[in-house]
Amino acid sequence: MRKYYQKEVETASREELIKMQSEKLVKQVRHVYDKVPYYRNLMREKQVCPEDIRCLEDIKKLPFLCKDDLRDAYPYGLLGTDLKECVRIQSTSGTTGKRVVAFYTQKDVDLWEECCARAIVAAGGSDEDVCHVAYGYGLFTGGAGLHGGAHKVGCLTLPMSSGNTDRQIQFMMDMESTILCCTPSYAAYLGEAMAERNISPEENKLKAGIFGAEPWTEEMRRSIEKSLGIKAYDIYGLTETSGPGVAFECEEQSGMHINEDHFYAEIINPETGEVLPEGSKGELVLTSLDKEAFPLLRYRTRDICILSREDCSCGRTHVKMTKPMGRSDDMLIIRGVNVFPSQIETVLLKMGYSPNYQIEIDRKNNTDTFDVYVEMSSIQMSDKISDIQKKEKDIETSMRAMLGIGPKIHLVPIKSIARSEGKAVRVVDKRKLHE
Ligand code: ADP
Ligand code: ZN
């Protein structure tokens, strides 16, 4: 079985990679400056011209680009080619505001699909596999990306899209799906739905899952691996940089290799914009080195992670990023304390609860209220009221130890929190309604 999809580049030496990135960067900056007036203005404002960019180090001279720039330039303002050369449009899910649209030439689609193919092969995929794609199809990039990647690998591809759980399970069993691609929250739901139908993890033919598009914890990984009887791999990407496949996990499952031949990654301090040394935690900034139609230079992803260039046992040389545990703008500030939803997930799953929870923030009498609704298991539901209250107190104590602030915990009956078919809605912030 093949171990890499594109061995030469995936295992290239650091020197080769840096040389490749430098050459591509110089070309890309020139291309963008000539073709995109929006960038030309940004660069002029910062008093940089293409001649100033001679090697990778010079990237620091370039201005950052952020999501608001994409919204300002909507829809065609950042096009790097004539519209006539484009063959596809995709769009963000709009999780954090107005949607952003991205354009692709045929070459852009091919390179994107190759990145997804690398992820599938890294998860053990080959032309022997049945790849069950349950990411949403349509404007969202999840479905299209993994679908294209699965074709490139030669898998038998099942374009299921999301939703209709009964049909998902029927096809998974009848067609003997071996690789499942969807959001981690939907994978967790499929695991739960199969257990309810008395299908044990040994009965399905699944061996691996490629899950991404939203933050998920290590605890969530273990829970999905157990419920589906698979190895669960992480995949990262965003519409602005094509979609999933910017980075993917190998068999080591300890961080995702960023496809460095196509994307140059930096970590910055989100407050000051200062570039941080390797190993620091900060905001991931990506530069697309090959994209034609929608080339982004120094794009601020708002995703918080750490980069590491330590050797990986899989033989891939590309830099690894840790799981982004939420975006800088996902961070909740509750009574002045910074809280990431992923911290709450970690506590709950460690204590043996299901990944079905919802956080509700509100403001009453000028104070933030902080409630977490958590589903009980069927065993717990038969507990006495006093036992349930004690469990709620226990969770509250663990949360306080983790977060420095204690939410009010509500253990609620099974199925009272809506299941997600795409990206899960973990937070309901009602404070925004009062603004
Ligand atoms: P939207 O920004 O509207 O959600 P996208 O569908 O393009 O649009 O989502 C991209 C975002 O999804 C990323 O910026 C990141 O925050 C999140 N994301 C994608 N993959 C992962 C992953 N593996 N782990 C954590 N977050 C992820
Ligand atoms: Zn590796």
Image (cartoon, rainbow, N blue to C red):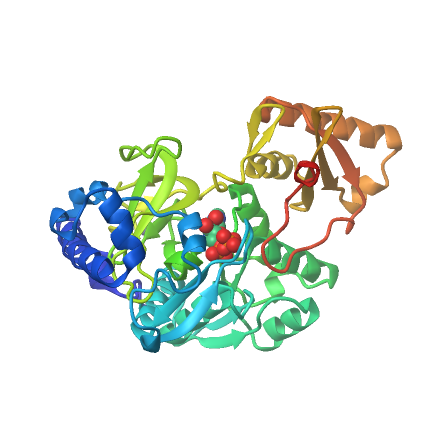
Task: Report the side of 27 relative to 35 (left or right).
Answer: left
Percent position (x, y) of residue 36?
28, 60
Residue lying at 19% horizontally and 54% vertically, measured from the top left: 25
Of the 4 image quadrants, the one containing the C terminus is top right
Of residue 152 and residue 46, the one placed in the foreground of this image is 46
Task: Report the side of 336 relative to 278 (left or right).
Answer: right
Residue lying at 37% horizontally and 61% vertically, measured from the top left: 77
Quadrant of the image occupied by residue 85? bottom left
Of residue 88 and residue 372, the one placed in the foreground of this image is 88
Of residue 277 and residue 47, the one placed in the foreground of this image is 47
Residue lying at 86% horizontally and 28% vertically, measured from the top left: 386
> In this picture, is 314 found above or below 218?
below
Quadrant of the image occupied by residue 110? bottom left
Quadrant of the image occupied by residue 57? top left
Percent position (x, y) of residue 354?
67, 45
Task: Report the side of 333 relative to 150 (left or right).
Answer: right
Task: Report the side of 381 relative to 116 (left or right).
Answer: right
Q: Is residue 267 visible?
A: yes
Q: Is residue 213 visible?
A: no
Percent position (x, y) of residue 90?
46, 67
Q: How many marks?
A: 0
Percent position (x, y) of residue 220?
57, 46
> In this picture, is 374 found above or below 401?
below
Of residue 25 and residue 144, the one placed in the foreground of this image is 25
Of the 4 image quadrants, the one containing the N terminus is bottom left
